[in-house]
Amino acid sequence: MWQKHRCIFFYEEMGMTEWAITTAVTLGIGIISYFLKRTMNQSDKTVQKLQAVEQSAVTKEELKENRKELQEEINRIREDYTPKKTHEKDFDECRKDIKDIRASYLTRDDFIREMNKMDRKLDQMLELMMKK
């Protein structure tokens, strides 16, 4: 019991200034810990990003090899390349052929009309032959 009273007495003796100092020191340590932890997290993220960049980096030999492959592909494309004028000539020929086809061939509808006329004439002839 005496010790319990002694603790209460000790706290009562401790002044308001000592309590404020203790609180300020605790807050200071907390703030310092917070910013230190934040700085360490940022540092870790930066290291991770740097490692990712290092892993995705290309060596000079790989770069030269890729350039060589790309240059070979460009050369193949240039060899197989057909100029636009050539294609335009081909299109013009196709357009001309289409015009010729339209001029010299019957359309489906025209063919059906002509066949119907022919059927009517045959029917008329058959009727004339049946009457005689």
Image (cartoon, grey):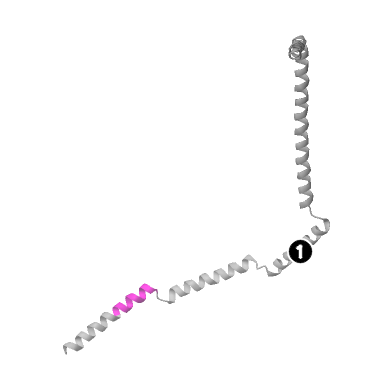
Which residue is nearer to you in this view: 57 or 110?
57
The C terminus: image quadrant: bottom left
Q: Considering depth in this image, is 50 or 19 the residue closer to the camera?
A: 19
Q: Quadrant of residue 41?
A: top right
Disc 1 element: helix
Left or right? Give the position of 93 relative to 53: left
Q: How many marks?
A: 1
Q: Pointer 1: what residue? A: 69
For disc 1, the neighbor class at 10 Å (few under 14, some 14 to 19, many from 20) is: few
Give the amino acid type for the residue marked by disc 1 in the picture: Glu
Relative to 53, say whether 110 is above or below. below
Query: Of residues 122 and 86, which is closer to you in this image?
Result: 122
Instruction: Judge left or right: residue 60 versus residue 83.
Output: right
**Residue at 43% in and 77% down:** 104
Q: Residue at x 77, y 29 (%)?
A: 33
Question: Within the image, what quadrant is residue 11 found in?
Answer: top right
Q: Main secondary structure of the magenta part?
A: helix
Q: Name the residue rendered at 77%, 40% in the picture.
A: 44
Residue at point 51% right, 70% down? 95
For the view shown, which residue lies furthest in the right direction?
Answer: 60
The quarter of the picture where residue 121 lies is bottom left
Q: Which residues are magenta?
A: 107-117
Quadrant the N terminus occupies:
top right
Magenta-drawn stretch contains 67: no
The image shows residue 48 at horizontal and vertical percentages of 76, 44
Residue 118 position within the rendered picture, expressed as x and y whole percent measured from the top left:
30, 81
In the image, residue 116 sits, relative to residue 69, either above or below, namely below
Q: Residue furthest front?
A: 1
Picture coordinates of residue 125 (x, y %)? 23, 85
**Vertical side of 53 occupied by 3: above or below:** above
